[in-house]
Image (cartoon, helix red, strand yellow):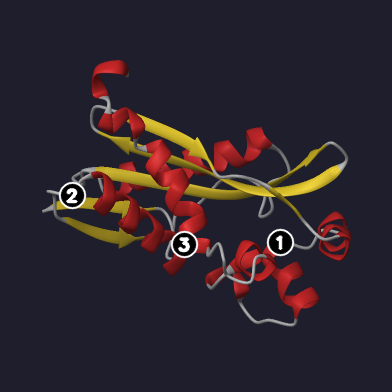
């Protein structure tokens, strides 16, 4: 059984990685472990570069902490302005002993009320809780689930990006480190 370390204890993030790996590696068995992993970036990354760095830092931390695993994953959600709107998205970085992959989720425009709170220094999950009158939504369906009425769950949102980040592991002949 292969061991996969996810740099988060968020159930949605762990489940998304689990679902992606099960779809990509249908003949393998995995043990998924979530650990607290520091991003070493702002609590609310506000650029593509910072968000990617947070995911990379989480993956590298999991690898240094549990070097005997087979895969190490970092996921970081972030915010960036595009075409005058504040958009939310996440980066996923996947490492193994011999390969690496990375991908970004799709992005979506946040409601103006949420944007205002974030601009005032509130983190997205807390802003969602305040605007949508929820508790701990970032551990549940998050902004993407709230805004799509769970047509896209937080798990499915990250799962597609995790599959995309696994492309170098699927098509190894085209990707070398």
Mark 2 or 3, nearer chain start: 2
Label placed on residue 124: 1
The reply to whether discs 3 and 1 touch (Cβ–Cβ < 8 Å) is no
Distance Cα–Cα, label 2 vs label 3: 19 Å
Label placed on residue 155: 3
Front: mark 1 or 2 = 2
Residue 51 in picture, x, y percent from top left: 61, 41
Residue located beneath label 2 in the image:
26
Q: Is residue 116 left or right of residue 130?
A: right
Q: Residue at x 66, y 46 (%)?
A: 107
Front: mark 2 or 3 = 2
Distance Cα–Cα, label 1 vs label 2: 35 Å
Mark 2 crowd level (few <14, some 14–19, many ≥20, 10 Å Cα): few
Is residue 45 shown above or below 176? below
Task: Give the image quarter of residue 64.
Answer: top left
Q: What element carries label 1?
A: helix
Residue 159 in picture, x, y percent from top left: 43, 52
The reply to whether discs 1 and 2 touch (Cβ–Cβ < 8 Å) is no
Q: In this view, does 148 lie to the left or right of 112?
A: left
Q: Is residue 55 left or right of residue 78?
A: left
Q: What element carries label 2?
A: loop
Query: Which quarter shows the C terminus?
Result: top left
């Amino acid at each position: 059984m292969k061991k996969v370390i996810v740099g988060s204890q968020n159930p949605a993030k762990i489940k998304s990685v689990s679902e992606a790996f099960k779809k990509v590696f249908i003949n393998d068995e995995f043990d998924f472990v979530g650990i607290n992993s520091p991003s070493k970036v702002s609590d609310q990354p506000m650029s593509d570069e910072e968000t990617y760095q947070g995911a990379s830092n989480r993956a590298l931390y999991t690898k240094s902490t549990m070097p005997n695993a087979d895969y190490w994953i970092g996921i970081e959600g972030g915010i960036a302005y595009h075409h005058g709107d504040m958009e939310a998205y996440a980066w996923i970085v996947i490492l193994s002993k011999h390969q690496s992959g990375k991908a970004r989720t799709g992005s979506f425009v946040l409601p103006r009320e949420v944007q205002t709170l974030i601009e005032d220094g509130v983190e997205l999950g807390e802003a969602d809780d305040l605007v949508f009158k929820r508790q701990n939504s970032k551990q549940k369906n998050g902004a993407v689930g709230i805004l799509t009425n769970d047509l896209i769950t937080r798990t499915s949102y990250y799962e597609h990006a995790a599959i995309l980040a696994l492309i170098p592991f699927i098509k190894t002949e085209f990707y070398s480190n």
